[in-house]
Amino acid sequence: MSFQFFPALLMFPVFLALTFLFSRNRMTTSQTYSGPFLFQSVSGSQGERASVLLQWIGIAFLFIALARPQQGFERLPEAGEGVDIIITLDVSGSMNQTDYYPSRLAAAKKAALTFIDGRPNDRIGLVIYADNPRTLCPPTFDHATLERFIQSAELGALPDGTAIGAGLAVAAKGFNYSQTSRRVIVLISDGEDTSTQVDPITVAQAINTIHGDSLKVYTVAIGKPLSEDGLGLDRETLSYIAELNGGRLFNVESPEELDEVYSAIDSLEASTLPAEGLFVYRDSYMFFLISGIFLMILSNILIYRFFKVVGN
């Protein structure tokens, strides 16, 4: 709980001290009870003491209400806020190679999990692809569920192959219901497109035509470049896809560089929302105001019941 006007709380002990000094100056040997401004009563009965206590609690509550207490409630970003991101992960058989310890896929998943932890206010989704693509998780703020999907992404979940174009197309389609103006695809691949359902260049051009500057594609190249027999990593295609859609190609040669890739994307696509979260503050003074008034009224009822005028 926070207070909009904190000095009001400091006014209560000052009021208490002034009341005590004022009461001492006015005390006489025979007196009538005059509320909280006198600390001494004639009979000192339990009812009298209860009345004084309730009255002072009521006054304290009124000072708290004057300080305007507020409570903060964390809220999730709305659909039009932050950045929508889809990680598009290659799960073809070649991702099982151990040149990235313990494997290419394991290193890619670990780096993705670190990236997700650093972007709590962005909606992030996951698409996997091999011979064909599959959306495992649409863009969501539920990062705990997303992380479970990433951890469960394994080789063999799809028929073997590398359908870069189809994976990219499904990832772009995942933004159909996105309301934010900032969208990002992170495409991870360690091979060339061997499952030509749709040409990756054609998909990249279509994305640029449909989404323009609102969707950027960052490509991450894992593995070795094309060999003489045409097998290996097609960096040229990945570079063209990224450049056409406002992103860039990252050449990754170690698991450590994978972390650096996500750090670079994190800085290039910084969220406009505060890292500590979004909070809505609501006034809570009404409880203290009503309680204070109620206790003051109750105290006066007790005064008339238990206190009598003594002397003249």
Image (cartoon, rainbow, N blue to C red):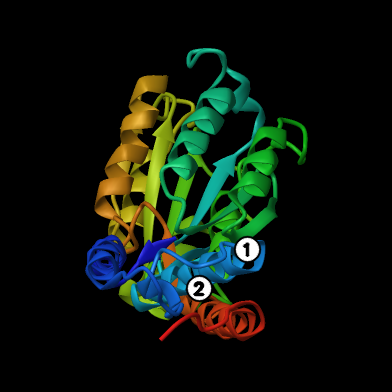
Element type where label 2 sits in the image: helix
Q: Of 257 and 202, which appears nearest the observer?
A: 257
Residue drawn at point x = 51 percent, y = 78 percent: 292
Dot 2 alpha-carbon crowd within 10 angstroms: few under 14, some 14 to 19, many 20 or more: many
Whether pointer 2 and pointer 1 mark residues with C-beta atoms closer than 8 Å, the reply is no
Nearer the observer, disc 2 or disc 1? Answer: 1
User: Please, what is the three-letter code of the amino acid marked with disc 2?
Assistant: Gln
Element type where label 1 sits in the image: loop
Residue drawn at point x = 39 percent, y = 57 percent: 217
- Placement of 186 over or under 67, stated as above or below: above
Query: Seen in the image, is 155 located left or right of residue 100?
Result: right
Q: CA distance from mark 2 to mark 1?
A: 16 Å
User: Please, what is the three-letter code of the amino acid marked with disc 1?
Assistant: Ser
- Placement of 230 over or under 244, stated as above or below: above
- Placement of 192 over or under 62, stated as above or below: above
Q: Which residue is mark 1?
A: 45
| Quadrant of the rendering where the C terminus is positioned | bottom left
Query: Seen in the image, is 132 located left or right of residue 59?
Result: right
Q: Which residue is mark 2?
A: 55
Residue drawn at point x = 51 percent, y = 68 percent: 52
Report if residue 119 is visible in the image. yes
Horizontal and vertical percent for residue 146?
Answer: 63, 47
Report if residue 130 is visible in the image. no
Q: Of 228 and 191, which appears nearest the observer?
A: 191
